Amino acid sequence: MVVPGQTLGDEQAMVASEELEQRRPRRGHRSQRDQNPLWADFIIYAVLLFVTLLTLLPMLNVLAKSLSDAASVSAHPTMLIPEHFNLDAYRYIFRTPVLIRSFGITVFVTLVGTFLNMVVTTMAAYGLSKTEIPGHKFLMWLVIVPMLFSAGLLPTYILMKDLGLLNSIWVLIIPGLVSPFNLILLRNFFWSIPPELEDAARLDGASDLRTLWDVVLPLSKPVIATVSLFYAVGHWNDFFTGLFFISDNSKWPLQVVLRSIIVDQSMMNMGGASAPNSDVSQMVVSTANITSATIIFAIVPILLVYPFLQRHFVKGIMLGSVKG
Amino acid sequence: MVAVTASPSAGTARRRPLLRKMWQYRQIYLLILPAVVYFIIFAYVPFYGLQLAFKDFQIFRGVWASPWVGFEHFQALFNSDKFYQLLRNTLLISTYRLVFGFPVPVIFALLLNEVRHVWYKRSVQTITYFPHFLSWVVMAGIVINLLGPTGVVNTMVRGWGGDPINFLANPSLFRINLVVTGIIKEFGWGAIIYLAALPGIDPQLYESAKVDGAGKLRQIRDITLPGLLPVMAVVLVLSLGSLLDAGFDQVFMLLNGATLEVGDIIDTYVYRVGLLDAKFELATAVGLFKGVVGMVLIVTANWILRRFGERSIW
C-alpha cells in the first residue's frame, strides 16, 4: 500500500526505529557480555567523562559568572564556582521590561499555541487514520506536499502581510498551527489502536466525535503528551518566526530578545539601563554578568521540564519518531 | 464534496454511493476540515507569491499586476559570483556536518553500550541530551562566552603564554566552529536511535563469534556495525534530503561581518536581501531555487530508501 506514512527532515529515527521494532523480540542479556579489559574500560569511561564535561562545564561557567561580582568575572573568566556570590545580575535583568514582556509573550504563545496545535492536529490525525473515507489519498497528499516543497520566506512574508499578521502575536501561533510531521505521528498511533475498541463504542451508538473523545483519546495520553511537548519546545525555542515577521520589539518573543541581549549584547539600549534611577544604577554589573544571567534565565524553564522532556521525547522515538 | 448539496434525497444518494458514503463520514471530514483549511492557506496560497521570481515587483500595483520579466532574475542570479559563494558555503557546511557529525553519535552509542554501571550511563545520557532542547540563541551565548575575545578559552591561552585567537571573527575557523558546536549540541541526542537499535542485534551472533575466537573489536566490526547499518543508512540518506539547509538559526547567530564570505548561506542571504534590503524578487528567486533543488533531493532520498528496501518516507 502507499504508505503516506513517514516523514522528512530530521525525522530519520522514525523510519529507522520502525525498522527495529520488528527485530526487538530477540533481545540478549547484557550480563552474558564479555568483560572488557580494565584498560579498555578505563579509556571508555574517561572518553565519556570528557564529552560529558564538555557539555556540562561551559554551562557551569556561565552559571558561576551570573552569580559573581563583575570584578571577579573579569579577573577569573574560567571560574566554575561563584566568587563574591550575589544576585545583582538577576535583579538587573528582572527589571528589564523588554525581557520580562517577551517572557510573558512566549509563555502565552507556548500555552495557547500548543493547545490550539493539539486540538487541530489531533482532530485531523484521527480523521486521517480512517483510510476508508473517500478522498483519503488526496487529503494525505495535501499534508505531505508541504513537507516536500515550500514556497520560501518571501512568499510567506507577503502572505503574512496580506493577512495582517505582521507584528501580531498571532503570527507566532497561526502559521505553524499544524506540523505535518506531528500529524502523521499521531495518525500512525491512532492507526495502531485495535479497531474493535472503536467498533464497540459505535455499536453503542456513539458518534465519531464521541468515540474519539471517550475511547481513543484516553488510550492516547502518552502520545498526546509527547506531541504536545514537541510543539511546546518548538514554541519556546522559536526564533525565526519572531525575527522574520515581528519588527516591533515590544512584541518580540523571548528568543529574539535573548538574541539582542546575548549575541548582540545590546542590553544597554533595551530598557534596562534606560531607567538609570536609584538602586539599579548602583549595582555593579558588567555585560558578562548580564549575558550570563540571561542565558541561565533562558535555560531554567527548560531545565524544570527536562525530566518530562527526556522521558517523553525518548518515548517518542520508541513510538517510531523523533523530532529535532 | 462539491456536489453534496445536489443530492439531498435518499433516493439520489442510493444511485450515487460515493456521495452517500461521504455523507456517512461527515463527522470525519469535519474533524479534518480545520487542518485542510490551514494547509491550503499557509502552505498552498503562498505559491502565488512565487510569481515574484519572474516579475518586476511594483509595490503599489501588487503582486498580480506587476509586469512579467521572464527569467531575468534567474539570469542575474546565475551570473553573479554571490550565488556560487552561497551555494558553496551551504553545501560545504552541510557536507562537513555530515562527514564529521555522522560518526560521532554512532561512536558515542557504542561507547555507552560498554558501560556497565547504570548510574554512570544515565548521568552521561542525561547531561549530553540536554543541549538538544536549548535554542541556538542560548547555545550561541554559551559559545561566545567560551570562544569570544575575553572568553574562557582565550583566558586559558593567555595564561599559558599564547596569543589570543579571535575564534568568532576568523574566516578560516568559522565553518569548524559551526560543525564542532553543532556536534556538541546534538551528538547525545543523535545517539538515541543507535542505542535503541543495539538490543535488536541477535545475541547468538556474538556467541558464535566468541566461539570462533573473535575479539571485542572484531565483534564490533563484524556484528554491531552491520547490525546498525540500516539505521545509519536511513540517517545518511535523509541528511542528503536536507543538504541545502545548513542550519539558519545557528549560522545566523554566529555570523558576522568578518565571516560573511565563508558563512553566508542561502537562508541567511534570503533573509538579508529579502526582508532587510527589500529585494523581494531576488530573494523569491533564490528561495524558489532552493525549494526546487530541495524537493529533488528529498524525492531522490526517498527513492534510494525504497531501492534499499527500507520503509520509504511516504
Image (spheres, rainbow, N blue to C red):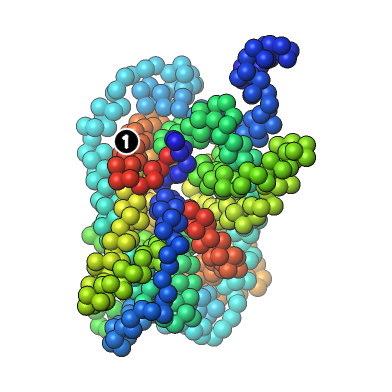
- Displayed quadrant of residue B39: top right
Q: Residues within 10 Å of mark 1 (few under 14, many from 20)?
A: some
| Residue A140 located left or right of residue B107 | right
| Residue B188 located left or right of residue A167 | left
Taking the image as drawn, is residue B253 in sight?
no
Kindly identify which residue carries mark 1. B296
Position of B154 relative to B228 (above/below): below
Chain hosting mark 1: B
Residue placed most toward the observer, A57 or B60: A57
Direction bottom: furthest residue:
A38
Residue B230: image x %, image y %? 33, 55
Residue A25: image x %, image y %? 45, 62
- Displayed quadrant of residue B198: bottom left
Name the residue rendered at 33%, 19% in the picture: B69
Quadrant into which the C terminus of chain B falls? top left
Residue placed most toward the observer, B193 or A109: B193
- Displayed quadrant of residue A232: bottom right
Name the residue rendered at 29%, 23% in the picture: B72
Taking the image as drawn, is residue B307 in sight?
yes
Residue placed most toward the observer, A80 or A198: A198
Position of B4 relative to B181 (above/below): above
SS category of the residue bearing label 1: helix
Position of A196 relative to B288 (above/below): below
